[in-house]
């Protein structure tokens, strides 16, 4: 079984792109061709979401190695939304895209096993965002899939939201009196756990970390702490992060990180220059242009190797 890191980096090289397109299907923001006449029920809204997501995937598939559906926006439409999530993952994989399910799941024992079964075994996502703050035992069923089924995980380490410092940045003291922010303790654990999973030919593990572009100094520090850890870097675009902020996340060969943009690509047609150039009617052109702009901006700071 080929490891997740190997598949991710092969796709990154093939497309010369480190772009991860976030799929956050907010019904009210979809182009009108999908929302008109579908406002009345969750089932109708979920149908609109699924149709839009398929069209979005068609546009971005040549430009990005990976997509990241945000599960919460699908779940917001009830059972029909969950079905749309599963079908969107299948559609992405049919188009040769890797899928990171952004669910931020984390629990212990049989509950964690159920989450792993749902997103890996049933939905068949390639990777999953997970929350380890209940303790490292919550990772066990996810790590089993990394070892045995070629899956990947991204552990929340330093998230991109302004409130991440409330807990993640708090100073902690180890058994020897040394101090470090909590996110550095988590990063060290992610590194050590990752070293126990199969590495790809370039030495990367399947146990990744979420580290936001909105904190470039911490990103540089955490990359140094986790030199073999794939990073999922949110915060680009709508949250204020830029390509230069992401530079430190990449390894020396231009691999090791994918940078996520959700609204900045999917709904680029709704604001700024893209609204003027394309608007609702040409939303596909807007998505294409925004993805190309991001791909090229990231190439300038970490040119991924190409096949």
Image (cartoon, helix red, strand yellow):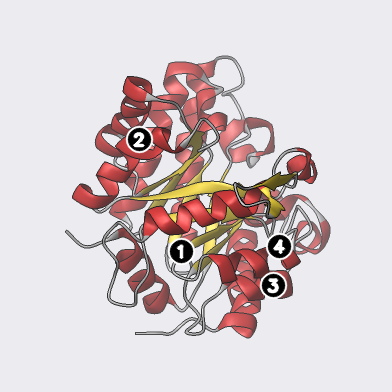
- Above or below for 219 versus 52: below
Q: Is residue 293 left or right of residue 139?
A: right
Residue annotated with mark 1: 229
Mark 2 or 1 closer to N-term? Answer: 2
In this rendered view, identify the residue nearer to me: 178 or 32.
178
Residue annotated with mark 2: 119
- The secondary structure type at the circle numbered 3 is helix
Quadrant (top left, top right, bottom left, bottom right) of the N terminus: bottom left
Name the disc covering residue 218, or none: 4
Residue 269: x percent and y percent? Answer: 71, 54
Nearer the observer: mark 4 or 3; the answer is 4
Residue 300: x percent and y percent? Answer: 64, 84
Which residue corresponds to the image point at 49% horizontal and 17% vertical from the top-left? Answer: 78
Mark 3 or 2 closer to N-term? Answer: 2
Q: Is residue 133 visible?
A: yes
Mark 1 or 3 closer to N-term? Answer: 1
Mark 2 or 4 closer to N-term? Answer: 2
Q: CA distance from mark 1 to mark 3?
A: 20 Å
In this rendered view, identify the residue nearer to me: 54 or 171.
171
Mark 4 or 3 closer to N-term? Answer: 4
Residue annotated with mark 3: 243
């Amino acid at each position: 079984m080929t490891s997740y890191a190997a598949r991710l980096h092969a796709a990154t090289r093939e497309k010369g792109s480190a772009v991860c397109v976030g799929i956050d299907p907010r019904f009210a923001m979809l182009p009108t061709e999908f929302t008109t006449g579908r406002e009345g029920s969750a089932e109708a809204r979920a149908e609109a979401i699924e149709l839009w997501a398929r069209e979005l995937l068609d546009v971005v598939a040549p430009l990005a190695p990976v997509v990241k559906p945000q599960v919460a926006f699908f779940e917001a439409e009830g059972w029909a939304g969950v079905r749309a999530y599963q079908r969107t993952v299948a559609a992405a994989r049919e188009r040769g895209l890797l899928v990171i399910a952004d669910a931020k799941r984390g629990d212990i024992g049989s509950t964690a096993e159920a989450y792993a079964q749902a997103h890996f075994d049933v939905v068949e996502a390639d990777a999953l965002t997970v929350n380890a703050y209940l303790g490292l035992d919550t990772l066990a069923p996810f790590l089993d899939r990394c070892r045995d089924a070629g899956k990947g995980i991204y552990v929340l380490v330093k998230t991109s939201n302004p409130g991440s410092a409330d807990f993640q940045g708090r100073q902690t003291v180890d058994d020897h009196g040394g101090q470090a922010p909590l996110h550095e303790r988590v990063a060290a654990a992610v590194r050590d756990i990752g070293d126990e999973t199969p590495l790809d030919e370039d030495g990367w593990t399947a146990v990744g970390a979420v580290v936001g572009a909105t904190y470039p100094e911490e990103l540089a520090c955490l990359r140094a702490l986790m030199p073999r850890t794939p990073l999922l870097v949110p915060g680009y675009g709508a949250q204020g992060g830029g390509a230069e902020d992401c530079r430190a996340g990449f390894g020396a060969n231009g691999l090791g990180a994918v940078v996520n943009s959700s609204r900045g690509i999917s709904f680029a047609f709704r604001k700024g220059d893209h609204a003027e150039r394309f608007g609702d009617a040409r939303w596909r052109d807007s998505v294409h242009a925004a993805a190309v702009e991001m791909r090229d901006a990231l190439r300038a700071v970490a040119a991924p190797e190409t096949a």
